[in-house]
Image (tube, rainbow, N blue to C red):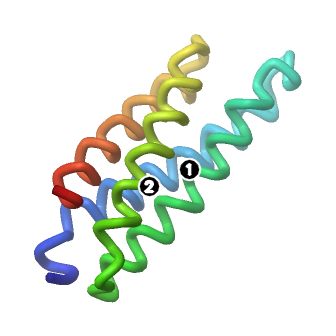
Amino acid sequence: MGYHEWKSCIDACLECAAICNYCASSCTKEEDVKMMAACIELDMQCASVCYATAQLMSLGSSQAKELCRICADSCDACGTECGKHNAGHCEECAEACFRCAEECRKMAA
């Protein structure tokens, strides 16, 4: 297995990572930044895991499926936290996280 077989999941991970970075940056501009602390932290963690997962899948790593399981869990946690906020960037991030989690679970199956 490699890039072409995992392309849908790779794309979902890269999109999620980019949107998580956008969300974290946008959260720092919110009026009550302290209220957004958990969201920012989970955004940054999720982006890191998504980038690593996409990279390992692109390399055809034998550990890609294991990392996809971790990535799905990270995306679920981030999506759940983002879903608690009414900011448009958080709503967009939650959607991307849940899409990525779904793709990662399919890949890890």
Q: Position of residue 2 (x, y in %)?
A: 19, 83
Which amino acid, by three-letter code, is at mark 2? Ile
Q: Quadrant of the N terminus?
A: bottom left
Q: Quadrant of the C terminus?
A: bottom left
17 in relation to 73, above or below: below
**Image quadrant of residue 84?**
top right
What number is the disc on residue 70? 2
Dot 1 falls on a residue whose secondary structure is helix
58 in relation to 50, above or below: below
Q: Which residue is mark 1?
A: 46
Q: What is the spatial separation of the Cα atoms under label 2 and label 1, in whole angstroms? A: 10 Å
Q: Position of residue 10 (x, y in %)?
A: 30, 66
Dot 2 falls on a residue whose secondary structure is helix
**Image quadrant of residue 90?**
top right
**In the image, is 106 to the left or to the right of 96?**
left
Residue density around tag 1, few if under 14, some if 14–19, many if 20 or more, within 10 Å: many
* Residue found 17% across the figure and 52% down from its top: 106
User: So how many labels did they put on this image?
Assistant: 2
Q: Of the two numbered discs 2 and 1 on the same chain, state the one appearing first in sequence.
A: 1
Q: Which is in the foreground here, disc 2 or disc 1?
A: 2
* Contact (Cβ within 8 Å) of mark 2 with mark 1: no
* Residue found 44% across the figure and 44% down from its top: 73
Q: Position of residue 31 (x, y in %)?
A: 85, 17
**In the image, is 5 to the left or to the right of 82?**
left
Which amino acid, by three-letter code, is at mark 1? Cys
Q: As rendered, which of 82 and 19 lies closer to the eye?
A: 82
Q: As rendered, which of 66 and 56 lies closer to the eye?
A: 66
**In the image, is 17 to the left or to the right of 97?**
right
Q: Position of residue 97 (x, y in %)?
A: 42, 39
What number is the disc on residue 20? none
* Residue found 39% across the figure and 70% down from its top: 54
Residue density around tag 2, few if under 14, some if 14–19, many if 20 or more, within 10 Å: many
